[in-house]
Image: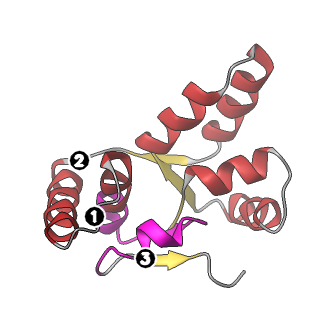
Amino acid sequence: MMIADSDVLIDFLRDRDPWAGRIELEIKTGHLATTTINSFELLSGAKSAADQETVSRLLAVLTVLGVTPEASERAAVVRRVLESQGQGIGMADYLIAGVCLANGGVLLTRNLDHFGRVPDLKLSGRHL
């Protein structure tokens, strides 16, 4: 399962390649997901009524994965490990990573600096 981070979904909404094309392709497969954290980020960043409608239409075609008990446990482990190394990535990113790990997904993101620190997290972003 491909799970899209907010940055690449914003690129899609703003028609910025190469991510706009990649997200469009993943949507067509019907297997693209995002997380409730990313949904929150997109919805809270949509200031105008038109932007809110556009974000809502996008989210309607994605599977939105929640923070389950397993995802929260995985996120907590990631946080403990990274912070013990002085490599924290922030609460939202811990939760996103936890959801991805719990669902066995591949995270589509441009934020390789943060998510590249997460042990066992599968990423797509280096090569499109």
Question: Residue visible at 28% across and 45% down?
Answer: 67
Residue on which the image places disc 1: 102
Q: Going 32% across and 73% down the picture, which residue do you hit?
A: 118
In the image, residue 42 sits, relative to residue 108, either above or below, namely: above
Q: Residue at 19% of width from left, 62% of height from top?
A: 74
Say if 21 sits above or below 58 in the image. below
- The residue that label 3 is drawn on is 116
Q: Is mark 1 on a helix, strand or loop?
A: helix
Q: Looking at the picture, how far across and down is residue 81, in whole percent?
A: 16, 70
Which image quarter: residue 21? bottom right
* Pointers 1 and 3 in contact (C-beta within 8 Å): no
Q: Callout 2: helix, strand or loop?
A: loop
The answer to whether the residues at label 2 and label 1 have Cβ atoms under 8 Å apart is yes
Q: Which amino acid does label 2 sit on?
A: Thr
- Real-space Cα distance between discs 2 and 1? 8 Å
Callout in the foreground (2, 3): 3
The kind of residue tagged 1 is: Ala
State yes or no: residue 110 in magenta: yes
Mark sitting on residue 55: none
Res 122 quadrant in image: bottom left
Write the start and end of the magenta stretch as one range: 98-119
Mark toward the start of the polypeptide (2 vs 3): 2
Query: Is residue 30 within the magenta segment?
Result: no
What is the CA distance from the residue labelled 1 to the residue labelled 3?
17 Å
- Residue furthest top as drawn: 49
Of the two numbered discs 1 and 3 in the rendering, the one whose residue sits closer to the viewer:
3
Q: Residue furthest bottom?
A: 127
Residue of label 2: 68
Q: Earlier in the sequence, mark 2 or mark 1?
A: 2
Ranked by sequence position, the earlier of labels 1 and 3 is 1
Q: In which quarter of the image is the C terminus?
A: bottom right
